[in-house]
Structures are given as structure tokens and as C-alpha cells.
Image (cartoon, rainbow, N blue to C red):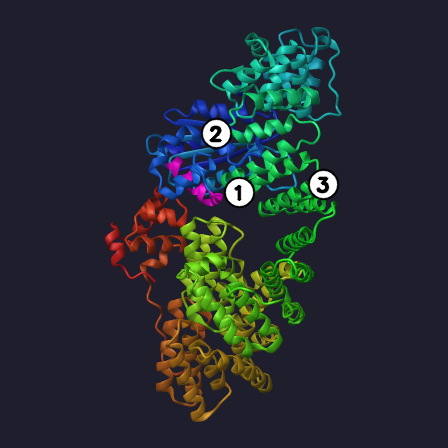
Amino acid sequence: MLLGRRAERKAIERLLADVRSRRSGVLVVRGEAGIGKTALLEYARGAASGFRVERAAGVESEMEFAFAGLHQLCAPLLDRLGALPEPQQAALGVAFGLRAGEDPPDRFLVGLASLSLLAEVSEERPLLCLVDDAQWLDAASAQTLAFVARRVDAERVALVLALRDHSPDPSDAHPFAGLLELGLDGLGEADAQALLATGVRTPLDERIRDRIIAEARGNPLALLELPRGAGPAKLAGGFGLPDALSVPRRIEESFQRRSHSLPAETQLLLLVGAAEPLGDTALLRGAAEYLGIDAEAAAPAKAAELLEIGARVRFLHPLVRSAVYRAAAPSDRRRVHHALAAATDPQADPDHRAWHRAQATLGADETIAVELERLAGRAWARGGPAAAAAFLEQAVVLTPEPADRARRALAAAHATHQAGAPEAALELLTVAAAVPLDPMGRARVELLRAQIAFDTTRGSNVPGMLLDAAKTLVPLDVAMARQTYLQALEAAVVADSFGRGRRVLEVAQAAQTAPATPHSPGVVDLLLDGLVTRSTQGYEASVPSLRRALGALGNHDRDPRTAAADDSRRWLWLGSRVAVALFDDETVYELAGRRVRLAREAGALSELPAALDYFAVVLVHTGELAHAAELVAEATAIQPATGTVTGILLAGWRGRQAETSELYAAMVQDATRRGEGAVVTVAQYTLAVLHNGLGAYRAAFDAAAGPSDSDELEHSNLALPELIEAAVRAGEPASAAAALELLSSRTRASGTQWALGLEARSRALTSTGPVAEALYREAIERFGCCRMVTHLARAHLVYGEWLRREGRRQAAREQLRTAHELLSGMGAEAFAARAARELRATGERPHKPTARPTDALTAHELHIARRVATGATSKEVGAQLFLSPRTIDAHLRNIFRKLGITSRRQLRDMQLP
């Protein structure tokens, strides 16, 4: 019964109307237990005329089983699985245990497959998905449904999720945060009185009625349940409710009283249903038969409106399940789980069978612990580390021997850490470390503790922790020790601009003592040797070895022996940073682009946002600011927290002072708190670019001084040309000369066109007469031979400014005109405005950039248009961007309207920026 709730019913009706109009809709219904969430979902089901309706519900005892909730929702739809692309079919097949898989499917690829499946089904008729008790969904299902909810757009799909206000772990933000929410409050007094009247058939004293309503606080289930425990005499004049308990707890106690009044066999049957989370009628009956429960035992539970057994086992309310299970004696719980294990087919569902056996066990049991450990691998293949961690943690509890318990606790800690639960991982490490371990075990504990610290804090103590772990590993496993030294160097690079290179040097000096690999050096060895050389012997000495490391990374795809011997994909990000440090524009473009391509091909959306973000950084420097913004939009759509670094770089190069300043303040505050000095260096470098574009040279000089002096891997080099330009214009010739000397030493060691172009432009700024002119021309020629168009445009700009000051107006106009066109075209607005001011000073009015139809497109729309223009179908583009084909088609309609075209062929013929 859904009394009142007019506004809430209207919200459901609007949602369904939107979906009927080919617009998808998502609604998260929130409120305390018993407040009416389930009733509102029932109203939605009844109002969804013409819809296909599918349901799922989170079950507290099922939270450890990856994709259990998603399987509930999608199982009836799997006859349409064949319409999905093969990678998506495989992802869902492995997630649901329908296929074998060595590695867990990427959780975002499972999300895309789920979205595609729902979209496919909705082609026949609109689809309404109802998910009750979403706070009890397993993590994998919750993340997948949140992914789907944020991407349904033009599909005829409605998704309504009911979420209890107080989750099992209130410290964790639920994955549905940010979606449209509908909060349910208590019923008003008139509706509460009407509902109470339907549940109380005996005379009710007016004062007692008012107190019940006040105590129930408008909670509909409380209004129906609380009076059930009171006799007519109490209702007539003496009914009271204990104020100490919350309303949901009172409701739960009411359900416990009702269940305790039933026959013993019925109570035991209720407990079987509460312990069996799948709602499988055959399994319930099998367990009941094992326990000797008569088939008629279900009748009293149905009469009491607690349990209904049909095609599926269904409790009146989730609180009935939890009330029955929590009230049961531990011995009865174990007895029921033993029966469920006996009734579960070991071939069809070994996971649940092992889980029930574990719950039925009192004390240690090595046999079951071994089975759980074995099944953890199967769980990993289905649901990733979180699923494996649940089995391993249970195995730890059941393990009798301390050494085996420590080994399993360490394995569980690894899985838990990879699942994104660092605090739980640290607790398991404490269990592992409580037992005397062999040297390798102690080293692994130490290493994992350091890796957790790096992932959670990035603090200044992390490089030292990793360094200690590496030293411990040296006599045990040389390859692992060298990889750990490289991780320590990576951590020091991230943190070290605060220490001006001291931490990196300390780690590098220690890594020098590591024994060489006994095998042919792989990517890890070459990167380690190169970075150690850079820190201990200087930039120039490191160039040859770092170049060899980049060559090994570049050959990784082409040489299967390298791929087998070395997991180079892990190091593409660090390799890209090394390429920037060497001014190797071709290699950084290739490595960063490959990282994106590999993530796309693997469907690895967990990796793709960071890969897109870094490639966008590269595109900013190549002058493709619009394309960079598209990638940032794509990355942010996948993972909203992505794109901060690229965001400030884009804002700075575009000359957007307010936006850059706001991002700078937030980034520096957060990075300083976390100890990430490299992020501060990027922010300071960007501020220098911004102020040079605006012509605020003193501010640019101040901003560039920090990163130029930091010796950070990437942006310390890039900050030097900014410092030189700002110093020359701000009247700081000594600073300009010192920075030029450092830059020249590095650019000549590098020898790339990008490096030598930067040196030539910087040296020209500090020179006069024919020497300066020759250097400006050299810079333009060298930048013209590399990808870094932003620097080519700025070379034309400073050359034009110099020519104007030399009184050569005609020649200046040519250079400034070119600079203005390039800078305007790429969107570097502050530098373009600077070129325009100089042009006006020569007597020429700069041409305003010609408006293009594509200017009306958003970054996301332009990104889709580019891909469609290559001839890709909507299904192919959707697979690349993790959107459904229908959503791509909806975006295309907007794109066609804005561009004034009507076909894909016309789009292919357009010149897209």
C-alpha cells in the first residue's frame, strides 16, 4: 500500500514518461528501513504499462560474491547476449561464471557489456530495472550499475535503485553518489493515521494512537508492525514503545517476535531462507529435506506474511531476513549452512557450497581452508581481487597451522589491496606478521606495506619504505629487488621536488648497490640503470641508457620475447615521462598513444582514464588543445576525478587566468598535503606559461623559478625556457644566462629537434643583432621538424616581436601573422592576444579567427564526430568510448543539427579541427 507520496509518485511517472519518449532515466530512492522504498518500487512496476520489468535486490549475506546482484538483474536477459560484441560477451560470461577466464574481466568492460545488454533488450520495448536494497549489493555489481546509470542516455531504459540511508559501512561513499536522488521522509499525520487504521482492527485509544504515530515518526512499516505485538488491552489504553531503539530496530524486533511465535519447524525453515541469499526454491527445499523439515512447515510463515515460496523464495521485507538470521542461535545457523552446503551442487556452484561449508564450521578446518584458497582463483577470474579476497579471508579464519595462516593472510592482503581496501589489507598484514615468517615472507609483507603507503598517502616516507623492502629482497630475488628499487625511484620522483632531488639521490645511490640481472636486461633493468645514472652522474650521462630503455619499451609490442620476459605495460607511464625528460617528442607521442590504445583494446577502463589524461598532456604540447579537451572529457566521463593536471595545463595554455589560478590553489594545497612535489612542479610550470602568455613577465619569472630549480623528471626541463623568456623580459639577465647554460647542457645531450629548437629560441632571446636573428630562424626550422607546434608558434611570436623592436615592420608582420594564426587556431588565447597586440603595433589589424561550424560542438561531441568521420559505425564508436550505440546516435543527431548536415558522408567530407 502506498498512501500519500504524491510528489514521489509523480517523480516515478515523469521518469517513465521520459523513457517512453526515448530518453533514459535514473532515480536513486533513499530513506531509512521501512520508510516505503520497496512500496515505491512496487508502484513503479505497476505504473510501467508497456515496459518490460526486471528486478534485483541486494542481500547482505551475498555481498562477498562478485556480480551476484548484477546476475540477478541480467539473468533473464541473457538470451540477447549473442547480439553484443565478442569482448563484451566474454566479459559478462566470465563475470557470471558462464565462461572460464584466466584473468578477471575489466570491471568497466563488464559495465559496458551490461549497458549494451540493457540497450539491446530495450529495442523491443522500454525496460524498467528495479533494484531494492542497493546498499547490500556486492561491490562489483554496485560499481557496474553505477557505471550504467551514468551512461544511459538515449536508451529506453529506466533504472530505479532503493538505497537505505545508513549503509553497512557509513564511512564509505556509495557508488551511486551524484545521481538524481529522491529522499523519502515519514508520512504526514493524516496519511499515518489512515495507514495505522488499516493495520489495527481493534479499538484504539486516541492517546495511544497519537503516541504510536509519534513514536513511528511516519515510518509506514513501523505503523503496521509495531502494534502487532500489543494485545487489545494495551491498544485500548496502555500501549507504549521503547524510546531507546531506532525505528528500524523496533521493526526488526517485531519481526523476530512474529517468527518466534511460529512452530519450531517453520522457524528453522525461515532460517534456511535467510541463510540462502539466492532465493532458489529448489535449494531451499533440498536443504529443508536434508534437515527433515516437512513441506507443510511453510504454511504458517506464509500466513504470518513473513515468507512466500513460489518461483523464488521471497521475504515480506529485507528486515525479516536479517531479523531471523540475527536472532538465531549460532548452532542453528551452522546446522542450516551445513544443510545448504549439502544441497548445493558442487559442480554447478562450488563457490556457494564452499562458502556454506565455511559458515557451518566451528573452529579451524584445513580441508575447507584449502578448498576456499583453491576457489579464490576462480573467484578472481570472475570478479577480480575483491571476490578472491573474500574467500582468502575466510580461509585465514579456518586455517589451523600458523605458517599456513600467515601465508594465506598475506595472499588475502594482496587481493584486498588490489581491490582498493587498504585498511583491511593492513589488518591482514598484521595477521601475517604475527607469525614468525621466513625471510621471503617478511620481505613480501614489508613490500606490500610500502606499496599500500604509496597508493594511499604518497608521503615522503614511502621511498624509504620501498628502499628497505628492496634491500631485504636483494639476497632473495634479484629481479623483484630491482623492480622494487625502480618503484622506490618512482615514488621519490613523485614526491621529491620538495626535497630538491635529495630523496631521489638517496634511493639512486642505494640502488647502485643492487646486483645486476643475471639475464638479458629488460625494461625494468634499463629504466632503473638510466634513472640511477641520471641522479648520480647527471642528466647528460644518463641519456644513452635512458634512450636504450625507451627503445626496449618501443620494441615491446613487436618482440614477443620481450613481452613474455618483462611486464612493460606497467612502465609505459614512467617511460613517457622519461621521453619528455629527453625531449623525445616522437617517443612520448608513441608511448602515450600506445598506452591509450592498449587500454582500449583490453577494455581496461580502470586504466584508460589515466592513459587518456596523460596523452592529453602530450597533445597540449603538440598544439592540439581541442583534441586534448576531448580526451579529458572522455576520461572524466569514465572517472570523474580524472583530469586535474591536464585541466590546469589546458587552462594555462589557453590563457584563462581565473580558471588557472583556482585550479592552481586547489592542486598545490592537495599535493602539499599528500607530499606530491611533482604535482606542485606541474602547477608552477603552468602558472609560468600562463603569465608569459599574458605578458606578466615578473609573475612568470617567480612561477618558473621553483620548477627550474627542482630537477623534477619532466617539467623542470620544460620550465627552463619559460624562466629564460620571463627573465629576459623582466630584466633578470643573470638568471636568464644561468638557466640557459643548464638548458643548453641538457638539450645538446638530447640532440632532438625539440630540444635544439628550445635552446635556439632561448639563446636568441638573450642575443642581439645577426646572431639573434639566425637563432630565431634556426628555432623555427627545428620546431618545424617536430611535433611541438606550440613551441613553433611561440618561436614565430618572439621572432616577430624582436623584428618589430628592430624597426623591421614588414618582416615582423609576417612572423606575427603566422604566430597569430597558429596560436588562434590551437586555442592558445593569451599568446594569440599577445601576437595580436604586436601586430597592431606594426600597423596591421589582426584578422579575427574565422568562425567554424564545429565551434558549436562540445568537446565530447567533437570527439564522437572525429571517430564517426573515420567511417566507424555507431556500435564501433560506442565500444571505443564505452557508450551504447543508441547514445552515439543521439549525439550524432545533435552534431548534425549544429553542423547543418544530414549524413555521415557529409561529416566525413568536413574539415574537423
Q: Nearer the viewer, residue 753 or 625?
A: 753
At label 3, the amino acid type is Pro
Q: Residue at x 75, y 23 (%)?
A: 243
Do tag 3 and tag 1 residues touch (Cβ < 8 Å)?
A: no
Q: Secondary structure at mark 2?
A: helix
Residue 277 image offset from top left, x and y in percent: 56, 26
Q: Nearer the viewer, residue 98 or 491?
A: 98
Q: Secondary structure at mark 1?
A: loop
Q: Main secondary structure of the magenta part?
A: helix
At label 1, the amino acid type is Gly
Residue wearing tag 1: 384
* Inter-mark Cα distance, 3 to 1: 27 Å
Q: Which mark is residue 72?
A: 2
Is residue 208 shown to the viewer in this render?
yes
Q: Secondary structure at mark 3?
A: helix
Q: Nearer the viewer, residue 82 or 358?
A: 358
- Tell me if 413 is positioned left or right of 788 in this view: right
Residue 87 image offset from top left, x and y in percent: 39, 44
Q: Residues within 10 Å of mark 1 (few under 14, many from 20)?
A: many
At label 2, the amino acid type is Gln
Q: Which residues are magenta?
A: 102-119
- Of the two numbered discs 3 and 1 on the same chain, state the one appearing first in sequence: 1
Is residue 189 shown to the viewer in this render?
no
Residue wearing tag 3: 402
Residue lying farthest front? Answer: 518
